[in-house]
Image (tube, grey):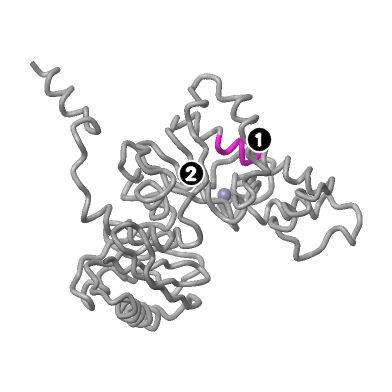
Amino acid sequence: MIGAVDIGGTKVAVGMVDDNGKVLSRVEAPSDPNDYAGSIQWIARSLRETARNAGTDLTGIGIGSTGPVDPITGEFGDVDFLPGWRGKNPVKDLEQMFNVRVALENDGDAAALAEAGWGAGRNRKRLIYVTVGTGIGGGIILDGELYRGVDGAHPEVGHQVLDPAGPPCSCGFRGCWESLAAGPAMAAWFRDHASAVSERGDGITAKQICEWAQQGAPLARKAVEHEAYYLGLGLANLINLFTPDAIVLSGSVMKSAALFLDGIRAVIRSGCRFVPAEKTDLMLASLGEDTNLIGAARVWHYRFARQPDSVECRPGKEVYGRAGH
Ligand SMILES: [Zn+2]
């Protein structure tokens, strides 16, 4: 039984997850951006409480966290939402408190591992996980291995530039995928194009726009078309770059995926002509609201409990071996 810890910018969730990816008990609380010491104590108490509630002992702890975090050392980087956590190391701290092995990954990577291991992407060796909500993030799995950049860095699929003349992004560029197609971008596009003040609605969300589009409201339908176009462009870039077996789509905006999928596919068909784009399956994530918590547990399995890949999955050594003779 793995204790799972999902550290987000607004909340921290803790739970017990069994070997099939099922959440047996969970608790959550708002994140404290400044008080790391208090937060790690709460996490430790919650791990004990959820283990008790599930009637089990902990065999390990997995953590998925908003980034940047260092998956190898376990250290927190300069996380926008959690300034007081910088330089802290929950992996070392929890290892000392519980005397079990602890593993940490970026939450996008954790969720990608969960969908690849227990969810929609099971048995897909080349899989890209994309979550579209208040931002756009994800994780890349190639030949069954989580893809890491230099020094274990997490690639940011949401910050690929689609339109250098587009809206400014927190990263410094303009027209990133995130700034064009995340939920707030869809709402902003709608507000900009609403002619009547009454139509505008300050607190409007992507979810509401999708509901109006389903009812046939013309401007909402245009917003959906625009959204599908930019979702499609970003996904087309990923297909051109990686030609994956599958892309697993998740996040609050993708709850309305039925509205976007035809438009997304049309964009992909219109441009991905030099790769077998029709072989990349677009799939919806299957683990639901607890994907990140389940992902945190999967991080532990990925790090410490993996079966060695079969020969079929690792042809490289065989081929090179033969070539040497
Ligand atoms: Zn950006």
The answer to which image quadrant residue 264 occupies is top right
Query: Judging from the image, what secondary structure is the residue with disc 1 in?
Result: helix
Looking at the image, do the residues carrying marks 2 and 1 touch, with CB atoms under 8 Å apart? no
- In front here: 183 or 74? 183
Ligand 1 contact, mark 1 (Cβ < 8 Å): no
> Which numbered disc covers residue 198?
none
Left or right position of 144 against 234:
left
Residue 54 image point, x, y percent = 32, 75
- In front here: 247 or 137? 247
Residue 18 image point, x, y percent = 31, 63
Residue 227 image point, x, y percent = 68, 44
Ligand 1 contact, mark 2 (Cβ < 8 Å): no
Magenta stretch, overall SS: helix
Residue 69 image point, x, y percent = 38, 60
> Which numbered disc covers residue 262?
1
Please say whether residue 40 is visible from this viewpoint. Answer: no
Q: Name the residue at 23% across, 78% down.
A: 97
Q: Is residue 113 shown above or below 8?
A: above
Residue at the farthest left position:
325
Q: Name the residue at 49% across, 49% down.
A: 285
Residue type highlighted by circle 2: Val
User: Label 1 neighbourhood size at 10 Å, few (<14), some (14-19), many (20+)?
Assistant: some
Residue type highlighted by circle 1: Asp
Residue at the farthest right position:
196
Q: Name the residue at 55% across, 20% down.
A: 273
The magenta stretch spans which residues?
A: 229-235
Pointer 2 residue: 248
